[in-house]
Image (cartoon, helix red, strand yellow):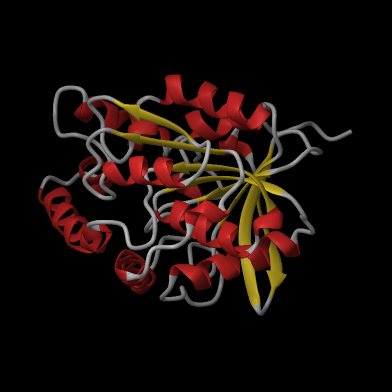
């Protein structure tokens, strides 16, 4: 009997080949039951998941995090549409032989998750959408401008862009940002490949297209859905979480005060149990 890995920093990186792409992924937590597949954010690789979110979920669930096509250690090129990214995610999930999954998604990952659920509703049992918004969502097409501005601000202050993009620049947000960035460094061995600049730019292009596309019919999403964000998300405006909540029947909404795009990371002590309880129901 192999010991169950419950800490994300200890999960070995594996690969699976499908559709001409080698996908890099990590899995942890007890086998059996419906796995929770994590869909990561813009410019992020496997190393960008907060262990304080992923570890509590992995204590009770089989968790799988992956690099989509062209991201991190996965081969191929990043597609320029969210829908194509969803197709790749579907290819990856099926390559692992999975017929039913729960999805935990953040930001860009939440857009990919929505596109996947609309196209393959039978695959998904439950959906967690955090820091994200719907196709055609107001001001999503401005993400690129905000992102480049904050990368510049971060470069000038020699800090991580996520400190600006994910957190408020105030007395609460700044320490929360530093704590989050430090948690991402807890894994020291077997780190993922860096995100390529061209891949990042293509992701931004896809997000802009998503923001400018026709709204999807979210009444098609009948899965139990948990939506969460901070109340001051500059990247994907917080009103879009409320918009998702209104349009996805019986969904639940959690908005954290005095926090931004990374509200779930700032409030990980409160949010992780909420996510665990939702998935266990």
Residue 276 versus residue 166 in the image, above or below: above
- Expressed as whole percent of the image width and height from the top left, the position of residue 28 reads 68, 39
Quadrant of the snapshot with the N terminus? top right
- Expressed as whole percent of the image width and height from the top left, the position of residue 246 reads 40, 42
Residue at (25%, 50%) from the top-left corner?
235
Residue 176 versus residue 81 in the image, above or below: above
Left or right relative to 249: residue 18: right
Residue 90 visible in the displayed image: yes
**Residue 243 quadrant:** top left
- Expressed as whole percent of the image width and height from the top left, the position of residue 7 reads 61, 32
Viewer-proximal residue, 54 or 253?
253
Viewer-proximal residue, 136 or 4?
136
Viewer-proximal residue, 83 or 176?
83
Residue at (32%, 26%) from the top-left corner?
256
Residue 70 visible in the displayed image: no
Left or right relative to 221: residue 50: left
Quadrant of the snapshot with the C terminus? top right
- Considering every residue shown, the one lying at the far right of the view is 1
Left or right relative to 152: residue 132: right
- Considering every residue shown, the one lying at the far bottom of the view is 20
**Residue 30 quadrant:** top right
């Amino acid at each position: 009997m192999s010991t169950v890995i419950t800490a994300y920093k200890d999960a070995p990186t594996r690969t699976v080949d499908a559709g001409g792409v080698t996908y890099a992924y990590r899995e942890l937590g007890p086998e059996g039951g419906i796995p929770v597949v994590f869909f990561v954010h813009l410019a992020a690789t496997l190393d960008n998941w907060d262990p304080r979110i992923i570890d509590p979920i992995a204590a009770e669930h089989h968790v799988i995090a992956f690099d989509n096509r062209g991201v991190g250690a996965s081969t191929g090129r990043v597609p320029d549409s969210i829908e194509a990214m969803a197709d790749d995610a579907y290819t990856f999930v099926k390559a692992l032989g999975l017929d039913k999954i729960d999805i935990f998604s953040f930001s860009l990952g939440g857009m990919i998750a929505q596109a996947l659920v609309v196209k393959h509703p039978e695959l998904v049992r439950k959906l967690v959408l955090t820091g994200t918004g719907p196709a055609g969502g107001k001001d999503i097409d401005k993400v690129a401008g905000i992102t480049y501005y904050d990368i510049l601000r971060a470069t000038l202050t020699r800090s991580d862009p996520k400190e600006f993009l994910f957190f408020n620049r105030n007395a609460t947000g700044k320490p929360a940002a530093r704590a989050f960035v430090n948690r991402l460094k807890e894994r020291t061995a077997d780190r993922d490949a860096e995100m390529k600049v061209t891949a990042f730019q293509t992701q931004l292009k896809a997000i802009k297209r998503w923001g400018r596309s026709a709204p999807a019919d979210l009444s098609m999403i009948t899965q139990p859905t948990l939506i969460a964000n901070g109340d001051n998300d500059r990247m994907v405006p917080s009103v879009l979480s409320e918009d998702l909540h209104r349009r996805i029947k019986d969904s639940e909404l959690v908005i954290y005060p005095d926090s931004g795009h990374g509200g779930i990371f700032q409030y990980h002590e409160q949010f992780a149990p909420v996510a665990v309880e939702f998935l266990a129901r």
